[in-house]
Image (cartoon, rainbow, N blue to C red):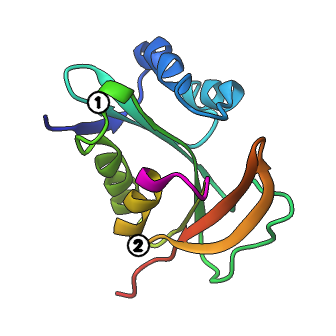
Amino acid sequence: MSSRVRRAVPADAETLRTLQRHLDSPAPELLDAALSGALGDLLVAVADAPVGYLLAVDGGPSVSDAGPIPGGGSTVHVAELVVAPAARRQGHASALLATLLSERPSATVTLTVEPGNGPARSLYDRFGFEVERELPGFFDDGPGLLLVRRPRPE
């Protein structure tokens, strides 16, 4: 099944809220701000209907003790990336990440992930993300990893 990526529209709101429930640590207020156009980039993966989304915000990671990311330039943080369980392993998350990276080629991109989330780690590895540092106590049930993808030299 092929995935098409587009910007979110107001009619996507309920579907995206339903998708957000699949996240371990959802931030409904963040999604609401993105849906209103007040915050970030909200990309939607569509098969026959929306099956996933990526929410990215300008700036470094929202991790108070992480400090700045070395490397300068603009930074965008992937705050949420989710694909419906029935639509996983079909390229939707890859399509979302590829779209973000093509729209922000000169940005440093950050995200956090649970160390034991093998499928997510594999996806991010394929896109050139590297572990910047461990974030003790980041998630309710343990540490997180801050991953970074720096822009490719031209």
| Residue drawn at (79%, 67%) of the image | 66
Residue 42 makes an appearance in the image: no
Question: Which residue bears the numbered disc 1?
Answer: 87
Q: Which mark is residue 128?
A: 2
Closer to the N terminus: mark 2 or mark 1? 1
Question: Which is the main secondary structure of the residues drawn in magenta?
Answer: loop
Query: Which residues are the magenta region?
Result: 114-119
Residue at the extreme bottom of the image, as rendered: 153
Q: Can residue 141 be seen at all in this image of the molecule?
A: yes
Check disc 2 and give the amino acid type. Answer: Gly
Q: Nearer the viewer, residue 18 or 98?
A: 18
Residue 54 position, x and y percent, is: 46, 41
User: Which class describes the residues within 10 Å of circle 1: few (<14), some (14-19), or many (20+)?
Assistant: some
Question: For the N terminus, which image quadrant?
Answer: top left
Query: Which quadrant would residue 20 be assigned to in this image?
Result: top right
Does residue 82 belong to the magenta stretch? Answer: no
Residue drawn at (31%, 51%) of the image: 94
Q: Is residue 151 above or below residue 14?
A: below
**The C terminus, quarter of image:** bottom left
What type is the residue that disc 1 sits on? Ala
Residue drawn at x 77%, y 52% is: 138
